[in-house]
Amino acid sequence: MSECNISIIVNGEQHELTVEPRTLLVSALRDELGYTGANVGCETGRCGACTVRENSKTIKSCTRLAVQADGSEIETVEGIADNGDLTTLQEQFQEQHGLQCGYCTPGMLMTADTFLRENDDPTREEIREAIEGNLCRCTGYQNIVDAIEATADQLGGQR
Amino acid sequence: MSDADTNEATESATEPDGDGSGGTFGSAIKRGEDVPLLTGDGEYTDDISLRGMTHLAICRSDHAHARIESIDTSDAAAMDGVIAVYTGEDVVESGVPNTIPTAWDLPGLVQPQYRMLATDKVRYEGTGIAAVIAETPHAAHDALERITVEYEPLEHVTDPVEAVERDVPPVHDEAADNVAFDFELGEVDATDEAFADADRVASVDLRQPRIIPNAMEPRAALADWENATGKLRLWMTSQNPHLHRMLLSAGTLGLPENKIQVIAPEVGGGFGSKIYHYPDEAVTAWCSMQLGRPVKWQATRSESYLTDCHGRDHVTTGEIALDDDGTIRGVRVETHAGLGAQLSQFGTATPSYLYTTVLSGQYTIPAIHCRVIGAFTNTTPVDAYRGAGRAEGIYVIERLVDVGARELGIDPAELRRRNLVPPDEFPYESAAALVYDSGEYERAMDLALDHIDYDELRERQRELRDEDRYIGIGIGNFVESAGLSPSGLAGDLGAQAGGWESSIVRFDSTGSVTVLAGTADQGQGHRTTYAQIAAEELGLSVDDVDVVEGDTDRIPQGMGTYGSRSASVGGGSIARGAREVREKARRIAAHQLETSVDDLEFEDGEFRVTGAPDRSLHIQTIAHEAYLGHDLPEGMDPGLEETNFYDPENFTYPFGTHVAVVEVDPETGEIEIERYIAVDDCGEIINPMIVEGQVHGGIAQGIGAALYEGAVYDDNGHLQTRRMDEYAVPHSTQLPEFKTDNTVTPSPHNPIGVKGVGESATIAATPTMVSAVVDALEPFGVDHLDMPLTPESVWRATEGDQ
Ligand code: FES
Ligand code: FES
């Protein structure tokens, strides 16, 4: 199968790689580049465990081919902490017990982080709608909603 | 060690870290394990890569039932990047034992052959028949398309009643009628008499659909066979690495146990589905042994749907006999339980003992009889899913109490109250062969009902009905047998494994503590709760304690995490081990302080001489002394660690009451969940934050089963719900806000008084939700509705079409 050369920026770092045209972005990130934070839960765009940001918008990286991301800037969960310190959102996930097995967590964090950039004072219903595309089998979502709400409260529109 | 080193070590050991105050048991301590999970550093099986790693894809049958006539793998084997293709015959020829064993025997049980890859017949869609190893996952999956299998299709059956009653070709020749077992519990004559004597009888026919567990991380394995040493290392998504090691050794691969290392790294949820020894992980290991190269297998989500053991699948007729005053006289139940095409390890125990023994629920029922026919069907094997057996049993008794209340015209809360086992009757021996350890059922029930102002709400319900609005109040009382299990009792009932748990509590020589635990976490927070248990017993801070799980080479023995057992049995073992460590430390302290052990008080990690509190030694200093070994009591061995095996004397019995308030729109069949209250009593609470998290997740799965979920097979025996957009895992807008509360009734026989909480809420939530919806539909004459309660089924019911 013919292979393609692509170039993507991940968490600020430039990468050149050669992939098959059918290689999914999530596979390129995980298997070629070692960003194993994004997880694969369904490969059908349903679970959201593979959520990353592409050019500032969240995408499910199992629904993108790596070649489609050529030239894009990708942010993964590995890139959201400030210099290794947890962000307020990450801290609140820990504080509110918003994760159990952690498998959905990287995707949840990417979705929530992006959402809070757009809405810094959300209602609980808005939060629930924002994370509707991210499935979690462990928590029943309530503590995740608490964590996102608490983050918004703490940041209080300073973002 | 030089003198300087010794001094330094001694000094640091005299200064306990943190506040060293103990008192951590019962606090909502944040989970240390969260940090790597939040940064993407947590390592799940598929995150691990080894040099020279190859990839396995498994060719699976697309027939539900067929004879394999031929398998042609030559095209696949010739493809670029393909290293090898193996069939079931190759596995047979290799001479390995090749047997997936059952772990629970029952009288008269038919145990058909269960191989790693099928050779003769495929018995359910998804049966593994060949294995492709390739350099990349793409190459391996491409090659699957080029394997040609010729089948002679056979008639299939997916329903457990049809399997037994219709004349169909048997799933296994050994069981001509598809009956794997015919199980009975309780006294048939006494029950018949109770029914004859009682004023009234109410009954319900119900189905409990197949649930697919849907751990967010699909199963995976990475095997690394080292030819030179004859050792197999296997990373896998496991709830019980030691059990997997044992089953791989004795069942499938035939390697000595000490030549197998099973590692469960981070595991992304289990809910039962990662207990079992499936063929796939054994095939992964076997392929690595053939090739001498690492082999990785990562299930796709569709493979998970097809092959992860499903749960439930019961078809039941239940009857309840009552007197006019509301006294329950007896319960009679007959169930056909679908087992799937093969016996998974606990596939027999779950619908027999785990199910029938809770049929007394929270009630004093003098006579109970239950018959369960375990049926082979051409479907994915069925085994324990969160709540396993207890969920199905509590669902039956709670539905029966509700239909009984209707029959008598008694309020369903009142009927429950009149029959609760009173607090002074514990230990209570039920007619279903369990001895409940402790309970305050009415207290928990009242607390739950108070949260919704029950009586007022009933009033309001009546008023609203006049306005054609239909709210329903559902009540779910539950008690479950958790903490699997007392080994002797389990053995008497057919278990092929023990029910103990094991741990090591080890002081390191500089005063830190390592706990090695035989259980295995999949999100439950063991690393935090276990540290709390050990820190409490040793008077330390949780930061002094590191917990290690999930590696059979580091942790000598263990049974694993299932059946709500980790806190009670695993935690019980750690507490006992820590107490032994503390007592050894006490003897060293007494010796060095020249006093008797009886004259020492222990507080905040410090042994103090009674009446002379300035004469004291900290337990971390003693740890150092224990490893120095210079000045120990006569005859004492050096070191400060204990290995503990804890075999509980009984199950523990968590209980509680959940209450739901719903509004049903008869025009659309839509259900709106207005309130959800969970009152759980799981005995002593180690970490309230984690307990609440377990309750939340449990409710979500219980509501999922009641309203949304269910595996569906089509007329060809194909699984229709095989993708995440076809199987309804609840998402965030489909679940309400939960209100949780607790009562605390310690387990009298558990070393730390805990009962366990992993499954409680799933057990409670399903009957609670169904009770609420059926209650809302009372004006439409609806006594029962089968799950999932979709808008369509609700709407049909309001139209008089049940
Ligand atoms: S793996 Fe991408 S949405 Fe599930
Ligand atoms: S924490 Fe396990 S799936 Fe969300």
Image (cartoon, helix red, strand yellow):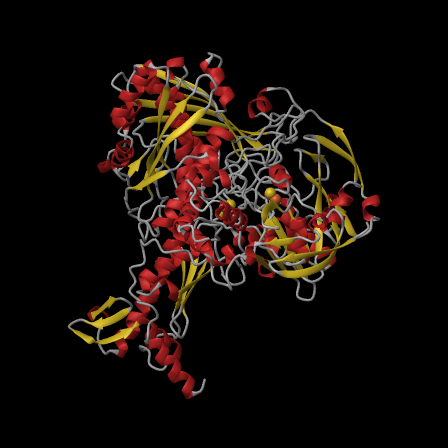
Residue B334 versus residue B256 in the image, above or below:
above
Q: Quick check: can you spot residue B197?
A: no
Q: Nearer the viewer, residue B537 or B368?
A: B537
Could you say where residue B289 lies in the image, as x and y percent from the top left? 70, 57
Relative placement, left or right, of B243 versus B619 is right
Could you say where residue B328 lies in the image, as x and y percent from the top left? 30, 23
Q: Residue furthest front?
A: A158
Q: Residue furthest left?
A: B611
| Residue at x 40%, y 73% (from the top left corner) | B639
Residue B290 versus residue B625 in the image, above or below:
above
Could you say where residue B671 lies in the image, as x and y percent from the top left? 44, 25
Screen quadrant of the N terminus of chain B = bottom left
Q: Quadrant of residue B644?
A: bottom left
Could you say where residue B598 lies in the image, as x and y percent from the top left? 21, 68
Residue B544 versus residue B201 in the image, above or below:
below
Q: Quick check: can you spot residue B380?
A: yes
Q: Nearer the viewer, residue B233 or B695?
A: B695
